[in-house]
Amino acid sequence: MTNSLNIAYDLASYDNIEVMVAGGTLRRQSFSLHGPAGEQLLKNYRFDKLFLGVDGFDLNAGITTPHEAKPM
């Protein structure tokens, strides 16, 4: 499961890997999807492993990444 379009594209060439993409609104700079649609989809799954890329960790805010999202 990924929210990254470029990662999904790269994995699509492997027959032995099932690729699922969490939906949402496109962040053009990072080719990633974000928003309530993807968050709702992810609530239905439990994963054994996680590869997480973030820009920061904060004790109060949690994991962070810069993004000036427009209100939905």
Image: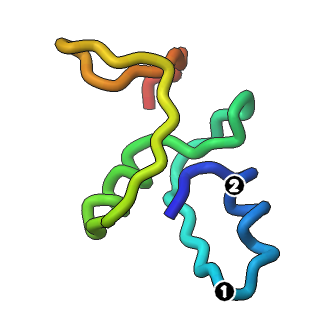
Residue 31, quarter of picture: top right
Q: Say if 9 sits above or below 16 in the image.
A: above
Residue labelled with disc 1? 16
> What residue lies at 50% left-to-right and 41% top-to-bottom?
34
Image quadrant for the C terminus? top left
Q: Is residue 31 left or right of residue 45?
A: right
Q: Say if 47 sits above or below 19 in the image.
A: above
Q: At label 2, which amino acid type do we have?
A: Ile
Tell me which label, 1 or 2, sits earlier in the chain.
2
What x and y, as percent, mark residue 16? Answer: 66, 86
Q: Is residue 35 left or right of residue 67?
A: left
Q: Is residue 26 left or right of residue 70?
A: right
Query: Is the residue under label 2 in contact with that under label 1 (CB below 8 Å)?
Result: no
Q: Say if 70 sits above or below 12 in the image.
A: above
Q: Say if 7 sits above or below 31 in the image.
A: below
Q: Which mark is residue 7?
A: 2
What x and y, as percent, mark residue 46? Answer: 27, 67
Q: Which mark is residue 40?
A: none
